[in-house]
């Protein structure tokens, strides 16, 4: 059985989504890294601590853009029309998956943040599951997850 560790600073609903998706996997949640070598994958979810090992993380921008502590604020201030989430290996900075969000003129900061959080809760667990199974993430794998936000601009998973 695969083992995953979720490192977090503040417990959040993304952790629940990950644990639900990984129900066939032994998943430990912790606020401090401890014996991390026993895990097949280390997952970061709003973790503000210092972890120097390799771990998968989700960032609320399309990296390398807005690689900061407040990427949504930076994107809004820059006036960008496309943002999204990036799932990547934190230490090596290797990008695993990116998913766009088109920012309409009338969208408020809180709405953008909410959309990105929804995508994180929907896509991040699928990517993590694929990593643990040694599979490659393809956006088409979202078809069976209900994973379309309707704000993607017409992807194949979109039914809106």
Image (cartoon, rainbow, N blue to C red):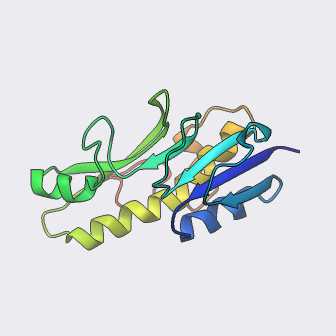
Identified at 28% across, 71% down, the residue is 111
Q: Residue furthest right?
A: 1
Question: Looking at the image, which is closer to me, 46 or 84?
Answer: 46
Q: Residue at x 58, y 39 (%)?
A: 55
Q: Is residue 57 left or right of residue 7?
A: left
Question: Residue 80: x percent and y percent?
Answer: 15, 49
In the displayed structure, 155 sits above or below 158; it is above
Along the horizontal axis of the image, is 51 left or right of 144?
left
With respect to residue 64, does 141 lie above or below?
below
Q: Is residue 82 above or below residue 117?
A: above
Residue located 72% across and 31% down the image: 134
* Residue 144 location (% of width, % of height): 64, 55
From the top left corner, tell me how far across and down residue 137 is, in percent.
Answer: 59, 37
In the rendering, at what x and y percent does residue 9 appear?
52, 62
Residue 160 visible in the current orientation: no
Q: Tell me the quarter of the image containing the N terminus.
A: top right
């Amino acid at each position: 059985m695969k083992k995953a560790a979720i490192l977090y600073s503040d417990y959040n609903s993304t952790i629940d989504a990950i644990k639900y998706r990984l129900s066939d996997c032994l998943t430990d949640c912790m606020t401090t890294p401890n014996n991390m070598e026993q895990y097949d994958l280390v997952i970061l979810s709003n973790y503000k601590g210092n972890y120097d090992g390799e771990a998968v993380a989700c960032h609320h921008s399309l990296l390398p853009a807005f690689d900061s502590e407040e990427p949504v604020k930076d994107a809004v201030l820059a006036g960008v029309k496309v943002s999204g989430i990036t799932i990547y290996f934190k230490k090596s900075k290797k990008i695993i998956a990116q998913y766009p969000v088109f920012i309409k003129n009338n969208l408020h900061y809180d709405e953008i943040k909410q959309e990105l959080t929804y995508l994180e809760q929907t896509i991040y667990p699928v990517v993590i599951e694929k990593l643990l199974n040694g599979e490659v993430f393809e956006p088409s794998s979202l078809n069976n997850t209900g994973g379309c936000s309707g704000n993607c601009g017409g992807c194949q998973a979109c039914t809106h």
